Amino acid sequence: MANKKNANQEVVVANDDVDEFRDAGNVDTWAEGVPTRKAQHFWPSAKRLVGLLSPYKAGMALVILMVIAGVVLSVIAPRILGKAMDVIFAGSISKGIPEGTDVSAMIEALRADGHNDQADMLAGMNIMPGHGIDFTLLGRFILTVLALYLVASFFNWLSGWLLNRLVMKVVYQLRKDVEDKLNRLPIGYFDTKQRGDVLSRVTNDVDNIQNALQQAISQLLQSLLTVVGIVIMMFIVSWQLALIALIALPLSGVAAGVIGSRAQGMFTRQWKTTGALNGQIEESFSGHELMKVFGREQDMVAQFTERNDDLYDASFNAQFVSGTIFPVMNFISYLAYVGIAVVGGLRVASGHLSLGDATAFIQYSREFTQPLGQIAGMANMLQSGIASAERTFELLDAEEQEPDRAVAQLPTRTDGRVEFKNVFFSYSQDKPLIEDLSFEAHPGHTVAIVGPTGAGKTTLVNLVMRFYELTSGSIELDGIDITDLSRADLRSKVGMVLQDAWLFGGSIMENIRYGRLDASDDEVIAAARATFVDRFVRALPDGYDTIIDEEGTNVSAGEKQLITIARAFVSDPSLLILDEATSSVDTRTELLVQHAMAALRADRTSFVIAHRLSTIRDADTILVMEDGRIVEQGNHATLLEAQGAYARLYQSQFAGAAEDA
Amino acid sequence: MLVHLIMKHSKPYVGWICAVLVLQLLTTIATLYLPSLNARIIDKGVTLGDVDFIWHTGAVMLGVAFVQVLTAVAAVYFGAKTAMAIGRDLRHEVFTSVTSFSAQDVNKFGAATLITRGTNDVQQVQMLVVMGLNFMITAPIMCVGGVIMALREDPGLSWLMWVSVPIIFVVVGVLVFFLMPLFKQMQTRIDGINGVLREQITGLRVVRAFVRESHETERFEDANAKLTRVGVQVGNLFVLMFPLIGMILHIATAAVLWFGGHRVDDGLVAVGQLTAFLQYLLQILMAVMMGTFMAMMIPRAMVCADRIGEVLDTEPSMTDPVTDSPAQPVDGTVVFDNVSFGYEGAESHVLSNISFTARPGQTTAIIGSTGAGKTTLLNLIPRLYEASEGRITIGGVPVSELSRDQLSRLVASVPQRPYLFSGTVASNLRFGARDASDDELWAALEIAQASDFVRAREGELDSKVSQGGTNVSGGQRQRLCIARAIAAQPNIYLFDDSFSALDVATDARLRAALEEPTKDATVIIVAQRVSTITGADQIIVIDNGQISAQGTHEQLLETSETYREIVSSQLAAEEAA
């Protein structure tokens, strides 16, 4: 589904085209429901998955014990129920025999008449002529059965309850670990992965693991034990009937296998056609206007109808074939049922088996098929859970960013002198990006970085933030190598306003305060005033409490940008990193954005990815980048004189318009 | 709505549904007949020692089981056919409805929700029909049949049914009642935690730049704890379910044996009949349980059905003019005559009193702040929106008198958000030019400055484009969209901020190359960058939905304060301040 781009392309995309990257994250909307992904290292992953439960060994042992106890009790119960049936049967026959009759004499008489079978049957029963049903005995059996079931149900409930808690704890911890891990992964990790993919590892996959742990493990255990228990009981009651019942086992296995594998193929086709059709619906509706403008409705409907028919065909087949599993399995169990009824009846009539045992047997044979079906279902769930676990473990095992050395510390107020010393950097080894770059930004100076899209301007500022590690060379802040600082220390001195105006789902107040969590309401509002946020916020019905939601319909792109500037303002950094690209901002707001950025820049060392002539012209240093390299550096006047790359850029981009103005 | 929707769409399949009904009835009868045959084996065969009878009845049972499997499979066949056909028809109807919508109608709903309605919602309703035909139909049949059969065996024990059926119904019902809101809450919490994570990943750089990892972790912890709490609650209820239901079934069994035993003792009923009664009771209880579970799906499906109904009940707000002799525009001149536009129900107009003429061979540029109504203005030309007041004509013919087909041949547009359809580069370029040859496509790519990267792609024209065009960069996507419009060779070109993702050099080359194919066409450009429009024949400055100034770049610099403001804001901030 996800058209994986190669890593190199990804890196470029991640650097300069944030929008692009966001889109890529949405690619696998339809991947969620895709049929079971196969795990690549099934057993090691399975082992590690089970290992997650190891902190709760005692609890797990208790769960397993209770599951075993519950299964044993519920497997024994039908046998005793059968005994109750025997009491009723014997009683009903006893009643038909006049009181005082000598039972053994009667049996002899039957034999003499040639009714050998009936004689045998009576001989095997506890006949009390004329007495009817022994209700004390019946009552005792029934109460025993109820007690057994009660205890079994209690164990079932308790083990389920306990397991639920344990699994929830484990999954809670797993989510926490994964989230912690995200914070320790280098930024580069996220560049090479699709956002949607990372997201699905921490969400869908963890949910899947939860299901597997919660349901698959306990039910698999329970079902397996039940099958074993029932087989044992069947053989205890009557091995002949047990054999009949067991014939059903390979039969249903074959049936389930044949139908199941056919159905699987059909389900895959169903998923594919569903994906194709939903894809078309998605794009036809999203591209509705284009469809109208280019007059393609008829073609779209025709294409849709064809795909819809395909889906109908595929889903009908899948539904039908998978739907036959149930009746066919049922039929097989009925075959066993009939076999048991007939052979059991014959054996009861011949006195080899009691009626109660026969009814108990029927119950066993019916209870037999259910766990078999469950095992098949759970196996699937377990498989998908383990595939998910593998993906999650992959994330947990990913290489982390270098730990902070933190051998040095910055004073509360830094001067903001930044020095690049022979910096080499590349995203991938075969493609050097920045080579031997040296320059110095003096306190309070503005460094403008210019160049065409994809030149690596964002990369440069990312290095100052230590989002990436240098290949060689060093970057110093106030004379201290930034790798000697903790990342937190370094970054807390830097304010950043990105092209991608990222805000989180919360109020405007909270979003501005994100820059400095202990800022008071007044400080937030002061920052908002300085950056022209206050003006438009006042016009909103909820003011600073307006919630920024994902669609962000209530606040325009330009206003969002202003909020991010306010956020940087409130953090009061000594060093600034600004990205001026504001293509989606209207001209009026753009003017405000510029003023706000200028306010923010005052007295701070600033790195600006510059798009505006005014910024560039006034910058103390201009770095001109092309193809990831700094090809020129200097100020506006010296660079124009040099007649190099900057001069060309200036001519094509600004000259004409500047003259007109 | 749900009932109405299903009823309406099941009409063509009444025959199949009747078949399902009859087959399910037969299946149920066969299923119910088996225990009674078993009872006879016990009462007549075993008790009397009649071996022949046992064999004979066994054979009958086998036959019944065989009939049962046949009818059951047949029922599945027709059930699946019906359900899938209803799903297909619903989906088709939603799709054609939305296709016939005007852009205005689509906007009223929002594309995202329409997609959900056409996919997920239809699927939910279809699922309900599947379940309905498989389980919900059988549950009542099984109940009625079971009761009849059970009463035949022993009416004296029937009170056990009247007691146990409501009990299981209530128990399952109560559990479902408590579980449903919890499930819903759980979904919200899952969405919540996913939301936090999504923000963390999308806002990764901001989080790290402000050193807010621990703050984010706290937010996550909170969401995680909340989710875990609901998860535990759901689990607590869930693990109650099976032991409880099991216990009810076991108690019912014990009761049948105890009270049945007394009736056997009194000679009112035979032992075999008692076992049959027991089986019936268990089958009825299982049916009730299944039915109640299935009922869980109904509220969800109802919501879905309502949402589908809304779409189907919406009449497209625009239709093609009905005429035998459609008017033919004389050329591509676009005239706005005092045009106003407002969204339905909105208080103020987005555009008011717009009048201008865009002539063939000329470029008309529109500039103004966001929200000023520039895109809306463009959308009025191919009649995506209908003007509320005033008149728009193309070549002398009002757009409302032109058919969709005519309009699509006259106008080609490049939208603000470059959008490509899944397929190949060629299939996208031919979107507006079905019969264009490969050479013509290459020519269009050449003009759009897109031939180089298309040539670099594997398969060139036939290289794959993923849905929305996400596998090409934003700039490339934009150029392909431009090439698509060029390939269509329209009389009127609409460019909505279509050069924004291009770097300045490419932008300049592209506009130079465009001159040749557009020299006889009417070109209307919406732009943010002043440099893009300085050469336009006329520039229209839109402010607050009205034309605030009109003229060439030079004229406007003289006359329009707004225009000067815009120009200076892009060139030098301090000069404007």
Image (cartoon, rainbow, N blue to C red):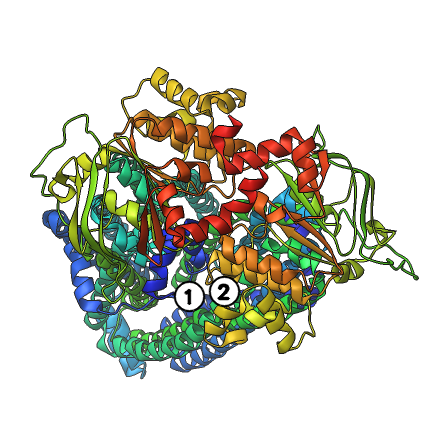
* Location of residue A236 in the rendering, given as x and y in whole percent from the top left corner: 19, 70
* Location of residue B451 in the rendering, given as x and y in whole percent from the top left corner: 53, 70
Asked whether disc 1 touches disc 2, contact meaning CB atoms under 8 Å apart, the reply is yes
* Most distant residue in the left direction: A407
Work out whether B277 lies above or below A528: below
Front residue of A100/B432: it is B432
Residue at 39% of width from left, 47% of height from top?
A641
Residue count near mark 1 (Cα–Cα under 10 Å), binned few <14, some 14–19, many ≥20? some
* Location of residue B537 in the rendering, given as x and y in whole percent from the top left corner: 72, 48
Front residue of A537/A594: it is A594
Subunit that carries the residue with mark 1: A
Residue B528 seen from this side: no
Residue at 40% of width from left, 78% of height from top?
B54
* Location of residue B191 in the rendering, given as x and y in whole percent from the top left corner: 40, 43
Work out whether B35 lies above or below B64: above
Give the quarter of the image for residue B124: bottom right
| Residue with the mark numbered 2 | B466
Label 2 secondary element: loop
| Residue with the mark numbered 1 | A3
Front residue of B253/B186: it is B186
